[in-house]
Image (cartoon, rainbow, N blue to C red):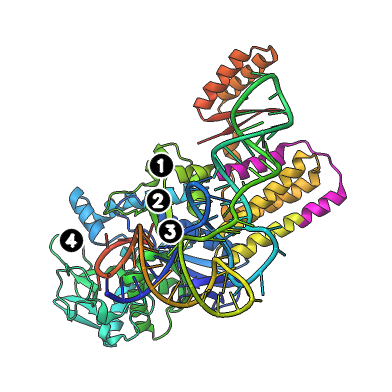
Amino acid sequence: MIRFYNTLSGKIEDFRPLRPGELGLYTCGPTVYDYPHIGNYRAYIFEDLLKRFLIFSGFKVTHVMNITDVDDKTIKGAKALGVSLNEYTKKYIEAFFEDIKVLRIQPADHYPRATEHIEDMVRMIKGLLDKGYAYFKDGSVYFSLAKFPDYGKLSKINKEELRAGARVETDEYEKESVYDFVLWKKVKPGEPYWETEIGPGRPGWHIECSAMSTRYLGPTFDIHCGGIDNIFPHHENEIAQSEAYYGQKFVNYWLHCHHLVVDGEKMSKSKGNFFTLRDLLARQINPVDLRYFLLSTHYRKMLNFTFDNLEQARASRQRIIDFVYELEHQMLPQKSESQTDSVSTMTGKALADFKDSLADDLNISSALGAVFELVREINSRLARNELSRPAANVVLTAIHEMDKVLAILPEKKEEELPAEIVIKIEQREQARREKNFALADSIRQELLQQGIVLEDTREGVRWKKIK
RNA sequence: GGCGCGGUACCCAAGCGGCUAAGGGAGAGGUCUGCAAAACCUCGAUUCGUCGGUUCGAGUCCGACCCGCGCCUCCA
């Protein structure tokens, strides 16, 4: 049984999908006004782990991720450059898709864009007006919290107390009550707008997710994810809008990812203490090492980004890569049935521990513990020359199975070297045969500068890339 | 002020009342090697922020306190 911590109940619950064997997953996507920072990607990688594990467990997952391509920031950005909204967001949408590809985040089934679903949002706002949950004020439409008594059930925020510590109200629109939120913003001069049945204007941020999630997944669906900072107000508002409109439960399981912090401080655009994926790629960081780093701490725990921690993650991942390399390339004896049996038992246990750990609210540390335990046990046999080829293949199959969830092993094509480096390696081998160790060492040093480590083993030289 | 999270070895990090407190990094010792590097093996916390309490038994439950962090209408 798979169990998740559900923000709604504040408890770990058994996961039961609405329909057996399949489920709907909605994850809050990027607002495309800038390049996402790696904190954003922590959430997307957590969601990727969740999705891959659910698929691994046999579920058919329908995944929807929205793209917010109209909001205050995108409008401001487009205006500043004097380009259309579409032209402005196009660049960041493309960047987002490039990024998730290099981070090995499996694409969603649908990426609905806010600007392409205005009709759905208007229909919903109209319905909320008809049912008395929303009201017009100066051409804008607001949701009335007074009409929705359940408000606050996700964030555990008491709406009477909302004012106490609240920040200064900066919204320039007039509302009946300070804590009502906007569904539809009246058109402002020089800003993009849509001519609709509820007047000219543009949607508020929250209605976008309510309209697009239910459009693709139905009025009630299984899992909704996002960053912890979306709990209030975004997800709370989504619940209010959707449940008021449909008159039924919106989402069964709410899973929220904790923040990535930098040196103990929250990484955010407004503080300026953030890194984008591009920043790290420019520093020769391998994106899959970043994936491993972001993946390897439990999603509900705050994760501290430092280059030292990233380096630890790199080294950790390298251990698994080296292990797989060893199993694939070592010459091993063909037969030894009894040992294959005991290796199968060991491997089966590791696989079971791996699954059980992830089923327990995605306990990745424990799951990786199972992987490393297997690595050590098998390495130990390898060191004693007690591993047969068939047994090694059993282990390899299991590791690749686990990598369907982790996606951290190198791809085959990454294992190819440029011709000039292959020549250098051969030159060094020649020098070593001639006992010209000075030359051999200088070539080794030269390649090291380029991030290629040479290892002299009993079977001959082998190389690997670092960085 | 309200709501919530965390404090486990030098660093990261599991653990959810009971077997020797996972695992990774760094470090030390060893194997291999022309020497190295890399890789591999072995080792490593009588102790879990502090003080009390509950219990036959507590890192794990309860209470108080100390420290760090987040949210309370931009935020993954």
According to the image, label 2 marks what residue?
A38
Q: Tell me residue A438's x, y (percent).
A: 59, 13
Q: Residues within 10 Å of mark 3 (few under 14, many from 20)?
A: some
**As drawn, A122 above or below A284:** below
Left or right, A398 with reference to A174: right
According to the image, label 3 marks what residue?
A302
State the separation of the CA atoms marked 2 and 1: 9 Å
Circle 2 SS class: helix
State the separation of the CA atoms marked 4 and 1: 35 Å
Q: Residues within 10 Å of mark 1 (few under 14, many from 20)?
A: some
Question: Which amino acid, by three-letter code, is at mark 3?
Answer: Met
Residue interval drawn in magenta: A316-345
Q: Which numbered disc, 2 or 1, marks the residue that appears first in the sequence?
A: 2
Mark in front: 4 vs 3? 3
Question: Which amino acid, by three-letter code, is at mark 2?
Answer: Ile
Question: Which amino acid, by three-letter code, is at mark 4?
Answer: Glu
Q: Residues within 10 Å of mark 4 (few under 14, many from 20)?
A: some
State the separation of the CA atoms marked 4 and 2: 30 Å
Would you say residue A129 is visible in this rendering? no
Q: Tell me residue A206's x, y (percent).
A: 31, 70
State the separation of the CA atoms marked 1 and 3: 20 Å
Q: Which numbered disc, 4 or 1, marks the residue that appears first in the sequence?
A: 4
Circle 1 SS class: helix
Q: Tell me the residue at 47%/75% (across/down).
A: A221
According to the image, label 4 marks what residue?
A191
| Chain ID, mark 1 | A
According to the image, label 1 marks what residue?
A280
Q: Which numbered disc, 4 or 3, marks the residue that appears first in the sequence?
A: 4
